Image (cartoon, rainbow, N blue to C red):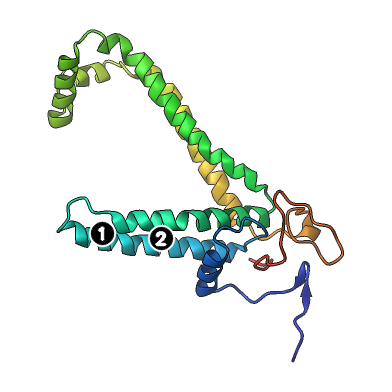
Amino acid sequence: MQSVPPGPQGPSRAPITFVDAIALGFKKFVDFRGVSRRSEYWYWVLFTVLLGMVAGTLDNGVATAISGFTALNDVTSIALFLPTLAVTVRRFRDAGYSPWLLLLQIVPVFLIAGVIISAAISATPFFTQYSEAELDAMVTEFLDKGTGPLLAAIENGVFNGALGFALSALLIVLALGIWQLVILCRPTKTFEQGNKRALPAAGQPAQADFPSNSDDGGTTS
């Protein structure tokens, strides 16, 4: 049998297929160690999108008989959460970045909370002029007809104090999303190329954010 020529991190691996990526995703569904190739990650993303579409279609069919039925979509989302997080962690490490950077995904949560608080502070002088019943009537009229004192207040800039903060938050969220997408699209960076989180060649110690294992899923894109 012809031997496989060694690569920069050991023997080279066969290309990852769509089926391989699905199998690896479930096999390593709580494995946050090692690395995942670019192809493995994006095949897994494709699988989750297709599965979500199927679950959503089935939910819509059942919803014709049971109003508001979304059980299949909900179960699918819960079942895929951990394996998707795990493969994303491994993909970050494979690209040469610390998986702890994924914690930046919670930044939008704080930004949204800040926008809501800012809007509430800006609108407080307007809303305190009315009773609870009057506010309910204004909100109902605005939602049902798109008219009324609330619309006039919005047009007069009652929420202008929060617009600057909201715009800044939107730009930050957009920048974070683009930055993460770029990382996830980057090719594999080997240990010899300076990636201290990847599996090194034999005889060299590894340095990783999490313990590394030998089943790294390969080192090529």
Quarter of the picture containing the N terminus is: bottom right
Q: Could one spot residue 47 in this view of the protein?
A: yes
Callout 1 environment at 10 Å: few (<14), some (14 to 19), or many (20+)?
some
Image position, residue 185 (x, y; %): 58, 56
**On screen, 187 above or below 181?**
below
Image position, residue 104 (x, y; %): 57, 39
The residue located at (71%, 48%) in the rendering is 209
Q: Could one spot residue 166 in this view of the protein?
A: no
The residue located at (19%, 24%) in the rendering is 139
Image position, residue 5 (x, y; %): 77, 79
Which residue in the protein does label 2 denote?
Answer: 49
Which residue in the protein does label 1 denote?
Answer: 59
Disc 1 from disc 2: Cα separation:
15 Å
The reply to whether the C-beta atoms of the residues labelled 1 and 2 are less than 8 Å apart is: no
Under mark 1, the amino acid is Asp
Left or right of 113: which side holds 183?
right
**Residue lying farthest to the bottom in this orientation:** 1
The quadrant in which residue 72 appears is bottom left
Of 83 and 54, nearer the camera is: 83
**On screen, 80 above or below 219?**
above
The residue located at (79%, 56%) in the rendering is 206
- First reached walking from the N terminus: tag 1 or tag 2: 2
The quadrant in which residue 31 appears is bottom right
The residue located at (15%, 16%) in the rendering is 133
User: What element does badge 2 sit on?
Assistant: helix
Image position, residue 100 (x, y; %): 63, 44
The quadrant in which residue 65 appears is bottom left
Which label lies toward us, 1 or 2? 1
**On screen, 214 above or below 212?**
below
**On screen, 27 above or below 125?**
below
Under mark 2, the amino acid is Val
Count of all numbered marks drawn on residues in the image: 2
